[in-house]
């Protein structure tokens, strides 16, 4: 009796044999200098990316990295980082300034690191200016609010998940730089 599992196994084995035959046929040498094959080689990378938007996505992610680094420096010192306005404008910039004001009023700073996994989830290259959305998973479990004078960690008001989805929207300026206009930590969404 032939089962579906048996048919799939035979098909997979046949495919593997065919692939081995093709690879063996391609590795032969016609110059008489027979050298053993070193295995399957990987093809050279293509000169053009499979994703036509890859360069633009990379530029968006680089700007996002600049934004989050400037934000972290701002909160670590309780002083506005001079690079921040290069990457943030409008609501994104004002939200960071509001948080900075909070830290200044409380006499606190942020210490540690936020682990991030950003991805460009939307990119519109047809619009003028170009627009992008970055979705990130920010893990702040090693990022603490501390008293700026004593270094003592401030107790969390409501302990809970410290991994949240962050959504940020950006536009490419006429100079070609990507600037973020919104930067929202979605406290109700964990990742």
Image (cartoon, rainbow, N blue to C red):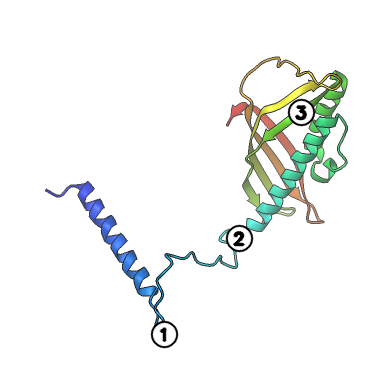
Q: CA distance from mark 2 to mark 3?
A: 39 Å
* x and y, in percent, of residue 126 in the image: 67, 56
Q: Residues within 10 Å of mark 3 (few under 14, many from 20)?
A: many
Callout 2: helix, strand or loop?
loop
* x and y, in percent, of residue 21 in the image: 31, 69
The answer to whether the residue labelled 2 contacts the one labelled 3, judged by CB atoms less than 8 Å apart, is no
Q: Residue 156 is drawn in which quadrant?
A: top right
The answer to whether the residue labelled 3 contacts the one labelled 1, judged by CB atoms less than 8 Å apart, is no
Q: Nearer the viewer, mark 1 or mark 2?
A: 1
Callout 1: helix, strand or loop?
loop
Which residue is drawn at the image coordinates 23% and 47% (left, top)?
Answer: 5
In the image: residue 167, left or right of residue 43: right
* x and y, in percent, of residue 19 in the image: 34, 65
**Residue carrying label 1:** 31
**Earlier sequence position, callout 1 versus callout 2:** 1
Q: Is residue 138 above or below residue 180?
A: above
In the image: residue 13, left or right of residue 84: left
**Earlier sequence position, callout 3 versus callout 1:** 1
Q: CA distance from mark 3 to mark 1?
A: 65 Å
**Residue carrying label 2:** 52
Which residue is drawn at the image coordinates 31% and 60% (left, top)?
Answer: 16
Q: Residue 93 is drawn in which quadrant?
A: top right
**Residue carrying label 3:** 111
**Earlier sequence position, callout 2 versus callout 3:** 2
Which residue is nearer to you in this view: 189 or 32? 32
């Amino acid at each position: 009796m032939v089962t579906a599992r048996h048919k799939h196994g035979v098909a997979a084995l046949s495919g593997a044999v065919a692939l081995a035959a093709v690879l063996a046929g391609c590795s032969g040498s016609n110059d008489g200098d027979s050298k053993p094959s070193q295995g399957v080689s990987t093809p050279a990378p293509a000169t053009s990316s499979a994703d036509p938007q890859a360069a633009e996505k990379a530029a968006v992610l680089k700007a996002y990295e600049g934004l989050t680094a400037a934000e972290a420096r701002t909160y670590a010192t309780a002083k506005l980082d001079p690079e921040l306005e290069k990457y943030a404008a409008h609501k994104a910039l004002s939200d960071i300034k509001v948080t900075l004001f909070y830290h200044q009023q409380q006499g606190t700073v942020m210490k540690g690191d936020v682990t991030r996994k950003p991805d460009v989830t939307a990119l519109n290259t047809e619009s003028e200016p170009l627009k992008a959305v970055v979705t990130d998973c920010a893990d702040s479990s090693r990022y603490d609010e501390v008293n700026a004078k004593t270094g003592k960690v401030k107790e969390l008001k409501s302990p809970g998940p410290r991994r949240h989805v962050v959504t940020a929207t950006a536009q490419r300026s006429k100079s070609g730089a990507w600037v973020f206009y919104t930067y929202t930590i979605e406290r109700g969404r964990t990742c």
